[in-house]
Image (cartoon, rainbow, N blue to C red):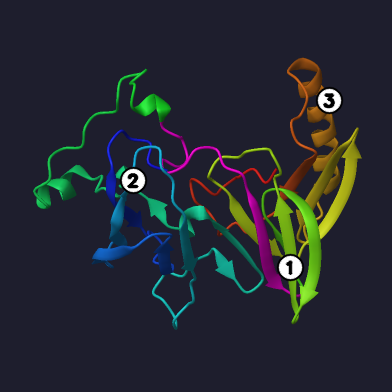
Amino acid sequence: MNKTDQPMPEIHILDAQESLQKLSFDRGFAETLTDKDIGYHIYKLAEPLKPNEAMKMDFTVGWQAKGFEAGQTKPEFAYNGTFFDRGYFPVLGYSEAGEIGDENDRKDQKLPPQPEMPEPGDAKYIRRNLFSEDADWIHFKATVSTSGDQIAIAPGYLQKEWTENGRRYFSYDMGETKIQNFYSFVSGRYAVKRDQWNDIKIEVYYDPAHEYNVARMIDSTKKGLEYFTNNFGPYQFKQFRILEFPRYRQNQNQSAQAAF
């Protein structure tokens, strides 16, 4: 949706993970710039997007290892599980996160110093979403497929599970509850411990060899739900899930994420 007061003649797309394979809009368009080194694309629209007008974008992404890499292997995808997020989807618009941050490197590239952080209460930045600048709170539903011996998890409540051609499928839906445009898809050969506090389902997904603190996690979850409900208000979801993931999957954004 164009939330500005001016027509939008082109769309800028950042493909930070080099995963974009195909992209299209529900109106005529032409790709006018492709920079594969930084994953930047510009698409000119045959008919500019008017203020407050919306259009649909469809895309296909994928990633496959090609031989052995020199220390750049992606920990998001392993033989016994996955943990990747929306970073593999196209990002709409220009992102300051892709700018060169080191001041010496900026001098070498003859770039000016980066601006200081905005003042508290800045009218522009106070409206900016913390996790993603290209979307507001969103309705979310997803169908996730994984190997036949694994469980796949995404935000939302499990609606359906089935097996087809040796793969397991899981359909999740957050219903009317909106979430931030910041989410993960996780799979693994999990064991699952289930319990309940009042009408809230509690689930812990863990490696069967790592059962050390599962009972304590469930106990602390119950005590936490009781304390926070009594002192702050009702828990807003119908489930509470804790997911184990490998230590080698370390990143400032992925070290912990809510799975609702």
Q: What residue is pinned by disc 2?
A: 97
The CA distance from mark 1 to mark 3 is: 34 Å
Q: Quadrant of the N terminus?
A: top left
In front of the other: 197 or 61: 61
Q: Is residue 24 left or right of residue 235?
A: left
Say which of marks 1 and 3 sits in front. 1
- Residue 226: mark in rendering: 3
Q: Where residue 60 sits: x, y (%)?
A: 48, 68
Direction left: furthest residue: 110
Position of 8 with respect to 160 (left or right) is left
Query: Is-magenta flag for residue 129?
Result: yes
Q: Amino acid at mark 1?
A: Tyr
Left or right of 59 on screen, residue 218: right
Can you give x and y, in whole percent of width and height, for residue 22 in the image?
A: 42, 70
Residue 158 can be seen, yes or no: yes
Span of residues in magenta: 128-148
Quarter-of-image position of residue 197: top right
Is there CB contact under 8 Å for labels 1 and 3?
Answer: no
Q: Work out whether residue 178 or residue 224 is closer to the camera in this orientation and state it.
A: 178
By secondary structure, the bulk of the magenta-drawn segment is best described as loop
Q: Residue at x 67, y 49 (%)?
A: 155
Query: Is residue 160 highlighted in magenta?
Result: no
Question: How many tags in the picture?
Answer: 3
Q: Residue at x 55, y 38 (%)?
A: 137
The numbered mark, 3 or 2, whose residue comes first in the sequence reads 2
Crowding around mark 3 (Cα neighbors within 10 Å: few <14, some 14 to 19, many 20+) is some
Earlier-in-chain disc, 1 versus 3: 1
> What x and y, as percent, mark residue 166?
75, 80
Residue under numbered circle 1: 169
Q: Work out which residue is located at the far front of the displayed protein and give it.
A: 47
